[in-house]
Image: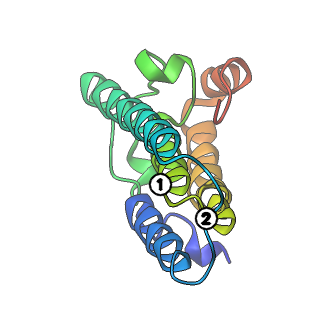
């Protein structure tokens, strides 16, 4: 399955998962949850996810780093500032939080598998190849960063 590595753009993966989550609304009964609670928590998760993703993009732009997830070997800069001080993958974490917010909004038990599927797929087919590329390019500097900062949270 190496052929899938860094081939499908992460936003497309998230969109496909979100579509599947939405489709589940037609098949699976919702859990009992007050509408106000559900919408409030969903809004907080989506806002946190968007903030996290935007913070990652801004840190990349400030550092002049490569934002193209298909060209993982083109990275010239190891970004460790901003959101990258807390997570090695703020943009992917942001997307996962948005999907979690969507799952809370839909409030079907099966929809909570969506963010987990995203995390599993992105870890295997995007993050691990990126980490191998960064380890080759930045060596001990990346190894020290990876030891100090968690992959997700």
SS category of the residue bearing label 1 = helix
Q: CA distance from mark 1 to mark 2?
A: 8 Å
Residue of label 1: 102
Left or right of 90 in this view: 71:
left
Left or right of 59 in this view: 142:
right
Residue depicted at x 59% and y 77%: 3
Residue 61, position in %: x, y?
A: 25, 30
Vertical comparison of 85 with 65: above or below: above
- The residue nearer to you, when weighing 114 against 72, is 114
Residue of label 2: 111
Left or right of 42 in this view: 113:
right
Vertical comparison of 133 with 20: above or below: above
The N terminus - image quarter: bottom right
Residue 4, position in %: x, y?
A: 57, 74
Vertical comparison of 5 with 36: above or below: below
Q: Earlier in the sequence, mark 1 or mark 2?
A: 1
Vertical comparison of 91 with 25: above or below: above
Q: Give me the disc on residue 63.
A: none
Left or right of 103 in this view: 65:
left
Scheme by which the image is coloured: rainbow
Res. 140 image quadrant: top right
Res. 134 image quadrant: top right
For label 1, the crowd category at 10 Å Cα-Cα, with few meaning under 14, some 14 to 19 and many 20 or more, is many
Residue depicted at x 49% and y 23%: 84
Proximity of marks 1 and 2: CB atoms separated by less than 8 Å: yes
């Amino acid at each position: 399955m190496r052929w899938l590595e860094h081939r499908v753009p992460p936003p497309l993966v998230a969109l496909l998962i979100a579509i599947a989550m939405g489709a589940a609304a037609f098949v699976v009964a919702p859990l009992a949850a007050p509408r106000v609670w559900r919408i409030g928590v969903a809004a907080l998760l989506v806002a946190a996810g968007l903030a996290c993703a935007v913070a990652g993009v801004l840190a990349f732009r400030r550092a002049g780093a490569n934002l193209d997830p298909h060209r993982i070997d083109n990275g010239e800069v190891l970004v460790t500032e901003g959101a990258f001080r807390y997570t090695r993958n703020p943009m992917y974490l942001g997307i996962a939080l948005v999907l979690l917010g969507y799952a809370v909004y839909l409030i079907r038990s099966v929809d909570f598998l969506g963010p987990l599927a995203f995390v599993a797929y992105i870890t295997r087919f995007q993050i691990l190849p990126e980490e191998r590329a960064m380890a080759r390019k930045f060596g001990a500097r990346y190894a020290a960063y990876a030891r100090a900062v968690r992959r997700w949270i």
